[in-house]
Amino acid sequence: MLVVVGGHSRNIGKTGVVAGLIRKMRDRHWTALKITQYGNAVCAHHTVAEGCGCEPDNGETFALDEEFEPNDTDSGRFKGAGAERSFWLRVPVGELPRAAGMVNKILAQGENVIVESNSVVELVKPDVFLMLLDFSCEDFKASSLRFLDRADAFLVIDRGINAPMWAEVARGMWDGKPQFLINPPRYATPEIVDFVKSKAAR
């Protein structure tokens, strides 16, 4: 089974969703992968003034690291949630297709793989593609908009509002598909877990 978790912006809880699904479905013996595209002047881990800590420091274009112990990094959180193996792949923005070999290598590591990424769906067809939405966040990544129609379901953070702040995104792009409300830090509800299991069973 291949599960992909994306989101329309940075820092809205995608890692929490992945970790929650791993924790609730430990019997699947997950291999987890987080994909970060660096070099676009915006970083999920640092402010622009601090510089991006995602760029490989060994002079290589791509970097693939495996996390072996639970810690505060995203891949470490996956490990702490129960993933058997957990990886972090870093690629330059827009260059993910050139790293397809690395992605395929990781997908071959286990029977069940869960990936935090939007753009990976241009390389693979997941069994389940979940998209996280936060109506209170104005930012909408171009990669998210590109793959919005491929999502099987939307996880909507419950902020008590029904209308998003995105003028350029047609509501019909998500209204016609299953939606699940989530209340952080509880990201993986029984309904979401059941949905993932039902999609995988098909």
Image: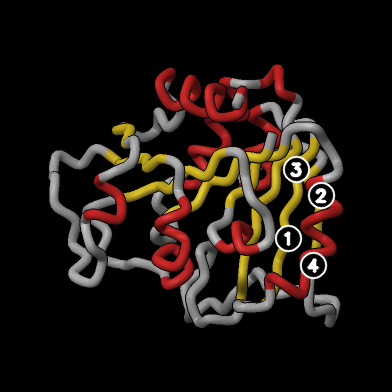
In the rendering, at what x and y percent does residue 167 appear?
18, 69
Q: CA distance from mark 3 to mark 4?
A: 14 Å
Q: CA distance from mark 1 to mark 3?
A: 10 Å
Q: State which quarter of the image contains the N terminus.
A: top right
Residue 141 appears left or right of 114: left
**Percent of width and height locating residue 141:** 41, 69
For label 1, the SS is strand
* Picture residue at 26% right of the left edge, 65% below the top: 169
Q: At which x and y percent is residue 108?
A: 85, 44
Residue nearer the viewer, 78 or 32: 32
Counting other residues with Cα less than 10 Å from the Cα at mark 4, is it few (<14), some (14-19), or many (20 or more)? some
Q: Which residue is mark 4?
A: 63
- Determine contact: label 1, label 2, CB under 8 Å: yes
Q: Measured along the vertical axis of the image, is residue 163 above or below residue 193?
A: below
Which of the two discs, 3 and 2, sits closer to the camera? 2
Residue at (33% x, 32% y) in the render? 180
Q: Counting residues from the N terminus, which is met first, the one under dot 3 or under dot 4?
A: 4
Disc 2 residue type (three-letter): Ile
What is the quadrant of residue 160 in the picture? top left
Q: Secondary structure at mark 4?
A: strand
Q: Looking at the image, is 102 positioned above or below residue 31? A: below
Tag 1 near tag 4, CB within 8 Å: yes
- First reached walking from the N terminus: tag 3 or tag 2: 3
Q: Which residue type carries mark 1?
A: Leu
The CA span between labels 4 and 2 is 13 Å
Q: Residue at 61%, 63% (x, y): give it.
A: 122
Residue at the disc numbered 2: 106
Q: Which residue is mark 3?
A: 86
Q: Residue furthest front?
A: 202
What residue is shown with label 1? Answer: 89
Q: Residue 151: horizontal and vertical position, in percent?
A: 45, 48
